[in-house]
Image: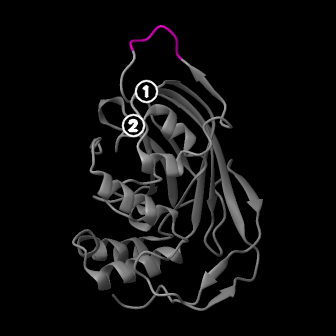
Amino acid sequence: MRLKSVVSGQWLAASVVMLLMPAGMGGAQSKATKPETGDCRQAVIEGDVKAGQGFEQEFTPDLKFLLEPLAQGSGWIVRVLPVGQPRGVHDYAELATPPYRSVTALAVSTDFSFRAQDAVGWNPRRFRYAQDAMTAKRLEGLYQGVVGNDAAASSRAAEISTEQPEGELQILNAVMVPGTANQWQMAAAVALHFENTPHEVVQGVQPSQLGKLEELQFRVKLELAPGVRAARNVTEEKIPCAVRSTVATNQPL
């Protein structure tokens, strides 16, 4: 499904503000924190995609990372899905990375009035993913309440999301046709690293307002949940253990 390309300035501003908040904000109350202990690890994957093509890689025995092409060639979106299970309506990254149905770090695209160079300049992009099917089910149960602006559902979803493993997508190189439109003010708030991101401009192409993303080379780092190891043939690195809130994710909805 293609994401909306044109949104109101107010909606875009509110969405970007949420994306720039520290993890766990945006409705959740502040909680005491404590450092995790133990051996923390992340899976590291590198790949490349061309317009209209996707990328898929298992990064644990139970989960896979996808960079899926969006409709009408607007770019790609990050997905995390269970291995060997029927695909549901929502994926694990979408559920753990609010805001929903709005500007999102998961979409590397010209949707929401981002030009191609804005999408590239939002680099790196950080997100979270539900660590298992049970957590995904809890978040899915809150989804309609969150999109319906229910404060309790939004607060609970934010608390659960804060407890989930983090991911980071870094664009290593991009091939694109730049857009000619004036940059949205809120797009500028996240598209800060275009000049520092390696990129190539396609020559001799008819210009357009938003431009087009032709190819991406990327690296994704996916924090692994405690006790989970990377899939075979996937690079695994030790990392400092993060500070987590004391909110228990096994509380009932």
Answer yes or no: is residue 60 visible: no
Labels 1 and 2 touching (C-beta < 8 A): yes
x and y, in percent, of residue 232 in the image: 66, 52
Q: Helix, strand, or loop for circle 1?
A: loop
Magenta part mainly helix, strand or loop?
loop
13 or 62: which is nearer to us? 13
Residue range corresponding to the magenta coloring = 202-206
Closer to the chain start, of discs 1 and 2, is: 2
Residue at 35%, 38% in the rendered image: 70
Q: Is residue 158 above or below residue 127?
A: below
- Expressed as whole percent of the image width and height from the top left, the position of residue 139 reads 36, 74
Which amino acid does the dot numbered 1 rest on?
Answer: Gly
The residue located at (67%, 31%) in the rendering is 198
Screen quadrant of the N terminus: top left
Question: Which mark is drawn over residue 110?
Answer: 2
Which circle marks residue 179 in the picture?
1
Q: Give how far across and how far down residue 196 sits, in percent.
A: 68, 37
Residue drawn at (62%, 42%) of the image = 193
Q: Is residue 251 above or below residue 1?
A: below
Disc 2 residue crowd, few under 14, some 14–19, many 20+, Cα 10 Å: many
Residue 24 to residue 122: above or below: below
